[in-house]
Image: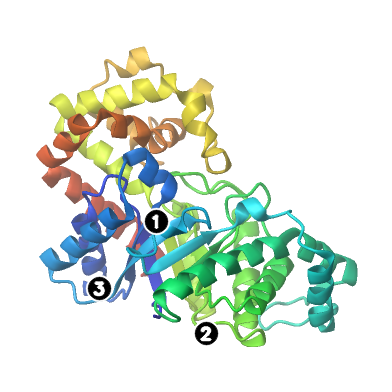
């Protein structure tokens, strides 16, 4: 199974927007953007929304059938590990192996020494095409990388082999994720992470490192854009080099997690992937949930009341909601609107604060981030929330399609 050059992960918290998401892909194809759709959902999201991996597969199959889609599509078991992989194997054909928690755990000295011995020929300068200055590494740095990452890669190997045993070699796609960590990986670290991946015989088709700057949920990139641009080009060059040097899949590409709404860097990414003639996977999830919320607010009446209740309760449970997303949110609680004020907002006031529109002076990135992780409140509403999704389906689905197509696919890939 081979992932196309361009792909997008379209997470859907509650499982009602699959058709709207696929419509965005179809519209992109009509203007010449050939992109694969990957419906992704993590174990964490399933636990909160009380859904199963089989529900994601069913949602995708229904959307594909109803819209007559003839292209490939994938079901991503997102951010999974050895402890929960069994829940996803039957329903998924794409597996994002999240081994971030194993970084800085040291494997045996024998395994570290064997890795160093195998790759000692790279000690010194490493000349890579399209990078002005060579990468440099000494034996101590190589050992430090092995001590920091080798255990994590070996954990990925265990997960991969368990999937392979059940599904058969070549019948699924692998992504390796290391993005939800406190520190970004450097280009030289990524090079030797990929060397370790090859040593483990993991045919990964995408890799998701952590970049410098902040990739917070549902809001724009925060950091030095020029630095990100330089870093991106070096990492793309490293991946191109590693594919050939370590005999990794020739379609290996970068995966950008928490990738939605990073409007200030989409043009930079567009230019870079064309320069290197390479692909990219953009992983999104919460942006669709936020468009659901905007749709409810636009509908007014009970839709607006539901949205207000979600925010008011989320504000009261701030610490709880932020805890499991600490690496990917950055919310200034002092800049959140008081619940008493939001309670009296009109639909227009709520939308101006929530919709990602930097030209609007009322847009509030803190408000948007809190609601991004506040889907747990909607899940707890149960039938009240689901009935509203069905009642206002037309306006919600229109928002979802437009958001993915206009703000993401066209900006990043056209």
Look at 18% across and 67% down and name the residue there: 64
Look at 10% across and 38% down and name the residue there: 391
Please give left or right for residue 361 compared with residue 100 in the image: left
Considering the numbered disc 2 on the image, is that residue within a helix, a strand or a loop?
Answer: loop
In front of the other: label 3 or label 2?
A: 2
Residue 329, percent from left and from top: 52, 39
**Label 1 or label 2, whichever comes before in sequence order:** 1
Residue 154, percent from left and from top: 65, 66
Q: Quadrant of the C terminus?
A: bottom left
User: Alpha-carbon distance for marks 1 and 2?
Assistant: 30 Å
**Label 3 or label 2, whichever comes before in sequence order:** 3
Considering the numbered disc 1 on the image, is that residue within a helix, a strand or a loop?
Answer: helix
Q: Is residue 138 above or below residue 83?
A: below
Q: Tell me the residue that label 2 is attached to.
A: 250
Crowd class of label 2 (few under 14; some 14 to 19; many from 20; radius 10 Å)? few
Q: Tell me the residue that label 1 is attached to.
A: 87
Look at 53% across and 49% down and name the residue there: 215
Q: Quadrant of the N terminus?
A: bottom left
Please give left or right for residue 313 compared with residue 96 in the image: left
Look at 89% across and 66% down and name the residue there: 140
């Amino acid at each position: 199974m081979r992932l196309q050059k361009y792909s997008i992960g379209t997470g859907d918290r509650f499982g009602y927007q699959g058709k709207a998401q696929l419509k965005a892909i179809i519209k992109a194809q009509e203007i010449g953007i050939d992109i694969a759709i990957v419906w992704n959902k993590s174990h964490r999201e399933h636990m909160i929304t009380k859904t199963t991996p089989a529900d994601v597969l069913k949602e995708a199959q229904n959307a594909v059938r109803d819209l007559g889609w003839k292209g490939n599509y994938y079901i991503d078991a997102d951010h999974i590990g050895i402890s929960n992989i069994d829940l996803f194997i039957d329903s998924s054909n794409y597996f994002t192996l999240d081994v971030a928690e194993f970084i800085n755990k040291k494997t045996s000295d024998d395994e570290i020494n064997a890795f160093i011995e195998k790759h000692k020929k790279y000690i010194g300068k490493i000349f890579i095409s399209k990078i002005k200055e060579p990468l440099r590494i000494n034996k101590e740095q190589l050992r430090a990388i092995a001590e920091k990452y080798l255990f994590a890669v070996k954990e990925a190997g265990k997960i991969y082999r368990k999937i392979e045993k059940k599904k058969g070699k070549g019948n699924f796609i692998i992504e390796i994720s290391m993005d939800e960590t406190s520190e970004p990986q450097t280009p030289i670290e990524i090079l030797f992470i990929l060397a370790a991946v090859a040593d483990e015989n993991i045919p990964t088709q995408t890799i998701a490192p952590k970049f410098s700057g902040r990739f917070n949920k549902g809001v724009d990139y925060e950091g030095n854009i020029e630095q990100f641009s330089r870093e991106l080009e070096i990492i793309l060059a490293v991946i191109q080099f590693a594919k050939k040097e370590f005999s990794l899949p020739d379609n290996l590409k970068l995966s950008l997690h928490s990738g939605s709404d990073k409007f200030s860097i989409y043009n930079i990414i567009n230019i870079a992937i064309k320069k290197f003639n390479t692909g990219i996977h953009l992983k999104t999830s919460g942006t669709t949930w936020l468009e659901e919320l905007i749709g409810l607010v636009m509908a007014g009446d009970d839709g607006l009341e539901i949205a207000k209740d979600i925010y008011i309760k989320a504000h009261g449970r701030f610490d709880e909601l932020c805890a499991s997303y600490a690496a990917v949110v950055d919310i200034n609680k002092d800049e959140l609107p008081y619940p008493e004020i939001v309670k009296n907002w009109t639909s227009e006031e709520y939308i101006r604060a929530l919709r990602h529109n930097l030209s609007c002076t009322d847009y509030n990135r803190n408000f948007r981030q809190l609601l991004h992780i506040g889907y747990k409140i909607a899940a707890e509403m149960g039938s009240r929330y689901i009935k509203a999704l069905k009642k206002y389906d037309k306006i919600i689905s229109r928002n979802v399609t437009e958001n993915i197509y206009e703000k993401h696919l066209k900006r990043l890939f056209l």
